[in-house]
Image (cartoon, grey):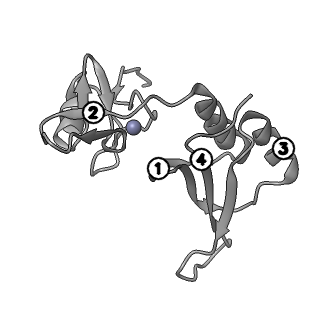
């Protein structure tokens, strides 16, 4: 028998990262189930919005005071959804002080120039890098695909 069930998950309002728990689950049939877990695992909720640990900092003088990082321009999300569409692979989001980073650890096919030029129309100044995995692997060879986008990226 096929049945339908509504599931609930938690997505970061700033970077769109989806919370997954230690079992790798991202959704629960309990409406507030994932929210509770996320908040126990360093996610932050404010006015009904949720932020992953990457997207807020604590005030240097007052540890209890949480500061959400500045919002990200929507071009970035357009770019990242194109990256996923063009490669057929979900790229994980992270960031350092200067860059947003999209990473796919199992890349079987490098992006060709046609795809890269489509991406450059959305954000022009990203850098793409391929790294060999550290351990040798059996089966089809894969690489790590890492795309770095400056936080002050240029967009039309
Ligand atoms: Zn986030």
Instruction: Tell me if 111 is positioned left or right of 2 in this view.
Output: right
* Residue at the image point whose x is 44% and y is 24% from the top: 2
Which is nearer the N-term, disc 3 or disc 1?
1
Q: Secondary structure at mark 3?
A: helix
Q: Which residue is mark 4?
A: 150
Instruction: Tell me if 97 is positioned left or right of 149 in this view.
Output: left
| CA distance separating discs 4 and 1 | 10 Å
| CA distance separating discs 3 and 4 | 17 Å
Q: Which residue is mark 2?
A: 67
Q: Are marks 3 and 2 in contact (CB under 8 Å)?
A: no
Q: Are marks 3 and 4 in contact (CB under 8 Å)?
A: no
The image quadrant where one finds ligand 1 is top left
| CA distance separating discs 2 and 1 | 16 Å
Instruction: Tell me if 85 is positioned left or right of 15 in this view.
Output: right
Which is nearer the N-term, disc 3 or disc 4?
3
Count residues near mark 3 (Cα–Cα under 10 Å), then give few for <14, some for 14-19, many for 20+.
few
- Camera-near label (4 vs 1) is 4
Q: Nearer the viewer, residue 66 or 8?
A: 66
Cβ of disc 3 within 8 Å of ligand 1? no
* Residue at the image point whose x is 24% and y is 37% from the top: 38
| CA distance separating discs 3 and 2 | 36 Å
Which is nearer the N-term, disc 3 or disc 2?
2
Q: Secondary structure at mark 4?
A: strand
Which is nearer the N-term, disc 2 or disc 1?
2
């Amino acid at each position: 028998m096929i049945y339908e069930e509504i599931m609930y998950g938690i997505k970061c309002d700033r970077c769109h990262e989806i919370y997954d728990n230690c079992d790798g689950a991202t959704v629960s049939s309990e409406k507030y189930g994932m929210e509770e877990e996320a908040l126990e695992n360093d996610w932050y909720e404010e006015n009904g919005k949720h932020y992953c640990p990457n997207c807020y900092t604590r005030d240097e003088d007052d540890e209890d005071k949480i500061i959400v990082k500045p919002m990200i321009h929507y071009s970035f999300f357009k770019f990242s959804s194109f990256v996923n569409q063009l490669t057929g692979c979900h790229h994980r989001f992270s960031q350092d002080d200067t860059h947003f980073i999209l990473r796919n650890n199992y890349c079987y096919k490098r992006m060709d120039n046609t795809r890269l030029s489509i991406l450059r129309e959305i954000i022009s100044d990203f850098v793409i890098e391929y790294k060999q995995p550290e351990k040798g692997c059996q089966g089809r060879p894969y690489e790590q695909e890492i795309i770095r986008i400056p936080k002050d990226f240029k967009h039309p």
